Each structure stands twice: as structure tokens, then as C-alpha cells.
Image (cartoon, grey):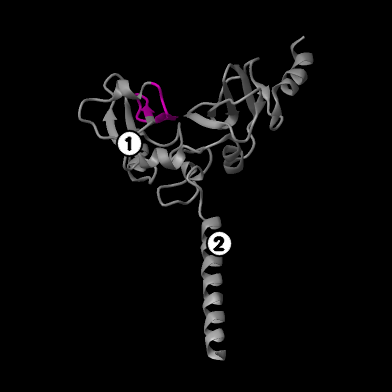
């Protein structure tokens, strides 16, 4: 009987160590959302970047090579745009657009979750992969701030849409608003990386944290008189 309890204790200890190790590995691994800002091998890329590419610095062909190897985009269907230098990476309710300029530089990457125009882009017989969308569909405003820090500005006058601006980085995030507050859980719908910083605009309000929209407007009133 004593040996039985010793075996049970040893088994329980082993299971505890295994579960503890699994938790540590999970905590140490980047979230699917954080993978947006990594190289294809999972190492962080110098900000600002998406999928390892930097608008205005990375060449257009090098950006395509990065997306062709990145775990979030490598399984998507690719379609070259005819009218402009660009490539579409399409998945179920997910589209990534890559655009270059006449000198072969990357000028923009955008990501759209659940885009309304996805059916217009499909051709008969196309098969679209669901995995990347399944990984990113829970992207939120809170995850954005946790992954790359606080934004410089916010725009609230888009109805049920809210935007965060990382102005010097040329990054703009779009979210679906649930109410008249800035909620960490508001869902990501689109993300843009441009080669140039976002321009100043009276509609952009300095970031002041999560909370009620009225607080932002109250702070902006004296500045607009």
C-alpha cells in the first residue's frame, strides 16, 4: 500500500511539472496578434513593421517574399493586381493587400478582417484558407496597445468605427465600436501601414486611455475654440 501511494505521489508530481512547463511555454509564446509584428521565424521586427516588412524601406519584392513565408499569410491564396503594383493575399473573411511604387519600394500593407468586398474579389472555383482569419479574429484594441504600446491619437467621429493612430510609425488601426466608450475588447477590423506618417488633422484627438468618448471631446473643446 505504501508503494502504491508513493507511485501516486510521483505521478502527481510529474503531471504538475508537465502542466507548469506547458503554461510557461504558452506564456512565453507570442499571441497570434503579436505575430503580425514579427519576422517569419517569429522574432520581433523593428517597428514600424508588419509581417517583417517596413513600408518605405523594404523593397516590394522583399515584402512579398516575407509574406510568402510568414505563418499568418503563407497559406493564403495570392492574386496579383493588374492596375497597380500590388498583390492580394486572400483567405476566408481576410484580405491582406501589398502595394509598391514605381521605384520598387513597399508603400503600403493593409489587413482587413471580415471585409464586405471579399465576395467581389473571388473567382469561380477559388478555395480560400480559413486558418489565418481564425487566428486573428479575436484581435482587439487592448491587444494592440499590449503588443506595440499606446497610440498617439484616436479618431472617434466615424460612427460605429473607431481609429487608433501611431502617427510617426504610419500605422492606423480600425475597430468596430460596441458603445460610446473606448473599450479594450473592441474588435479589430482593419490595419494599415503607410510609408509616410499620418498627417495632422483636427479630427484626431490625443490618446487619453480607455474610457468614455465624452472625456475626449471635453478635453478637445478648449483647443478648438
Q: How crowded is mark 1: few (under 14 residues within 10 Å), some or many (20 or more)?
A: few
Q: Quadrant of the N terminus?
A: bottom right
Q: Quadrant of the C terminus?
A: top right
Helix, strand or loop for disc 2: helix
Name which quarter of the figure residue 157 lies in.
top right
Task: Give the image location of residue 166, x and y in percent.
Answer: 59, 31
Task: Give the image location of residue 94, x and y in percent.
Answer: 39, 32
Q: How crowded is mark 2: few (under 14 residues within 10 Å), some or many (20 or more)?
A: few
Instruction: Pick out the residue farthest to the front.
Output: 1
| Magenta stretch bounds | 98-116
Q: Does the magenta stretch include residue 94?
A: no
Which tag, 2 or 1, sits closer to the chain's start?
Answer: 2
Q: In this view, does 60 lie to the left or right of 122?
A: right
Camera-side residue of 206 and 85: 206
Seen in the picture, residue 15 relative to 131 is either above or below; the reply is below
**Residue bearing the label numbered 2:** 24
Q: Does the magenta stretch include residue 107?
A: yes
At horizontal 40% and vertical 48% (from top left) the residue drawn is 40
At horizontal 68% and vertical 29% (from top left) the residue drawn is 207
Seen in the picture, residue 63 relative to 31 is either above or below; the reply is above
**Residue bearing the label numbered 1:** 61
Helix, strand or loop for disc 1: helix
Amino acid at each position: 500500500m505504501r508503494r502504491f501511494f508513493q507511485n501516486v505521489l510521483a505521478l502527481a508530481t510529474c503531471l504538475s511539472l508537465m502542466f507548469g512547463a506547458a503554461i510557461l511555454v504558452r506564456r512565453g509564446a507570442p499571441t497570434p496578434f503579436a505575430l503580425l509584428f514579427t519576422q517569419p521565424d517569429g522574432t520581433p521586427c523593428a517597428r514600424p513593421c508588419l509581417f517583417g516588412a517596413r513600408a518605405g524601406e523594404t523593397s516590394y519584392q522583399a515584402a512579398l517574399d516575407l509574406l510568402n513565408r510568414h505563418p499568418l499569410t503563407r497559406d493564403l491564396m495570392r492574386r496579383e493586381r493588374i492596375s497597380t503594383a500590388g498583390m492580394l493575399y486572400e483567405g476566408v473573411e481576410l484580405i491582406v493587400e501589398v502595394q509598391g511604387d514605381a521605384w520598387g519600394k513597399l508603400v503600403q500593407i493593409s489587413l482587413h478582417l471580415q471585409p464586405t468586398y471579399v465576395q467581389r474579389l473571388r473567382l469561380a472555383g477559388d478555395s480560400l484558407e480559413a486558418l489565418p482569419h481564425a487566428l486573428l479574429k479575436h484581435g482587439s484594441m487592448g491587444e494592440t496597445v499590449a503588443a506595440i504600446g499606446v497610440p498617439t491619437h484616436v479618431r472617434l467621429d466615424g460612427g460605429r468605427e473607431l481609429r487608433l493612430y501611431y502617427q510617426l510609425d504610419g500605422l492606423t488601426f480600425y475597430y468596430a465600436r460596441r458603445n460610446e466608450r473606448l473599450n479594450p475588447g473592441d474588435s479589430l477590423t482593419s490595419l494599415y501601414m503607410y510609408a509616410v506618417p499620418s498627417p495632422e488633422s483636427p479630427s484626431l484627438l490625443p490618446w487619453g486611455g480607455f474610457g468614455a468618448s465624452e472625456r475626449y471631446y471635453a478635453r478637445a473643446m478648449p483647443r478648438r475654440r
